[in-house]
Amino acid sequence: MIKHLSTIEEVIAELGGFDAVKELTNAQAPSVVPMWKHRKKFPAVTFTTIQTALQQRGMSAPNSLWGMP
């Protein structure tokens, strides 16, 4: 059964927190992931990386978290 996540906060938590998501997405600055959380949107370039990591863990997140329909 797939666990459906609905918020940026849930995605970040399920992937191991700010540092883990920063490493997963190859983000450069330490403040990048908290900024995504504040904006309530991931950058489009992280879509495949994050969705793949979630799928490997039996989870999913809506495209809207990347500003896509």
Image (cartoon, grey):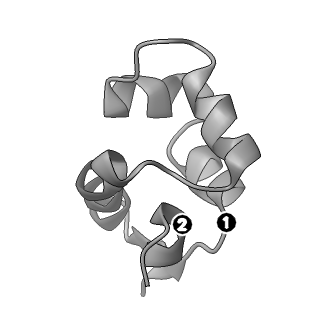
Badge 2 density bin: few <14, some 14–19, many ≥20, Cα 10 Å: some
- Occupied quadrant, residue 27: top left
Please report the residue visible at 70 percent of the width from the left and 48 percent of the height from the top.
Answer: 39
Is 61 on the left-hand or right-hand side of 41?
left
Which comes before the other along the chain, label 1 or label 2? 1
Most foreground residue, 13 or 35: 35
Most foreground residue, 13 or 62: 62
- Between tags 1 and 2, which lies in front? 2
- Occupied quadrant, residue 16: top right
Please indicate, yes or no, whether residue 4 appears anywhere in the rendered image.
yes
Q: Quadrant of the N terminus?
A: bottom left
Given the image, on which type of amino acid does mark 2 rest? Answer: Leu
The residues tagged by marks 1 and 2 sit, at their Cα atoms, a distance apart of 7 Å
As helix, strand or loop, the secondary structure at mark 2 comes to: helix
Most foreground residue, 10 or 62: 62
Name the residue furthest right: 38
Badge 1 density bin: few <14, some 14–19, many ≥20, Cα 10 Å: some
Please indicate, yes or no, whether residue 62 appears anywhere in the rendered image.
no
Q: Are marks 1 and 2 in contact (CB under 8 Å)?
A: yes
Does residue 23 lie above or below 33 as drawn? above
* Residue identifier under label 2: 65
Given the image, on which type of amino acid does mark 1 rest? Answer: Thr
* Residue identifier under label 1: 7
Please report the residue visible at 24 percent of the width from the left and 57 percent of the height from the top.
Answer: 48
Residue 17: x %, y % from top left: 61, 34
